[in-house]
Image (cartoon, helix red, strand yellow):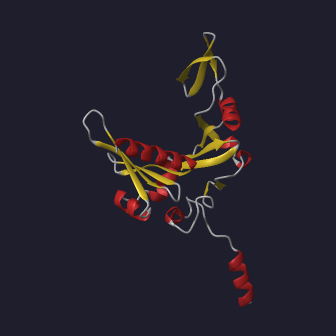
Amino acid sequence: MRILKKIFKSKKQADLELISNPKVLFNNKISVFEITLSRHKIGDSVNELRLDEVILTGLETYPKKTEGRIWKDDKTFVLINGKEIEFTLKERIEAVINEGGWIGYKDGSRFRIKNEKITSFSLHLERLSPYSELSKKSIIQKLGKRVKIKETYEEFDGTLFHTDIMNFERLISITWDDWDKKILVISLGDLVKEKLDNTLSRVMQKE
């Protein structure tokens, strides 16, 4: 019986979900490509997403001949030949799938799509609740020695607005709201590498 229990335990999969096991975010032994958000991993096909739960899109490609965009009544409209035409959620999702962009669930899970695959994901709104007790100092410590920090200041009075705390090796970025003293967004994947590359290039230019 003990042998059977040991075999069962060895086959039991580790919990790598960011919501049910938030510790995986700061575990340096776990690759971001193993971590899941809403049961999705970086590298998964867009077909794995629950498209019926998508409520928003971002950075999608707009129809040809679009002259302008209008947002009203929680809907998106485009101007084509002077006419206002609704760009429906279904059409926007299809544009993201085909051309790339972002899609988001109601719970605050958001996914970046490129070439019909998930390349990044981020946590917003209620998805941040497992991390609500973290301080800025503890986040910097937990992300390790390879951390890069980018501070953004308010143009009007020069106060610190928010801080991006990024780890290049693990492709993790946490944006801290310095006004409200809380996490704004947690991001994982290729988007973080782009943010880091942009930060490093600006530093090199200054030098």
Is 118 or 184 nearer to us in this picture? 118
Left or right position of 25 against 98: left
Q: Residue furthest top?
A: 82
| Residue at x-position 70% and y-position 34% | 94
| Residue at x-position 47% and y-position 52% | 173
- Is residue 134 in view? no
Image quarter of residue 20: bottom right
Q: Quadrant of the C terminus?
A: top left
Image quarter of residue 89: top right
User: Is residue 72 positioned above or below 9 on the image?
Assistant: above
- Is residue 49 in view? yes
Q: Residue furthest bottom?
A: 2
Left or right position of 3 against 41: right
User: Where is residue 84 shown, x and y percent of the image?
Assistant: 61, 15
Is 168 or 69 nearer to us in this picture? 168
Is 106 or 114 nearer to us in this picture? 114
User: Where is residue 9 shown, x and y percent of the image?
Assistant: 68, 79
| Residue at x-position 53% and y-position 55% | 171
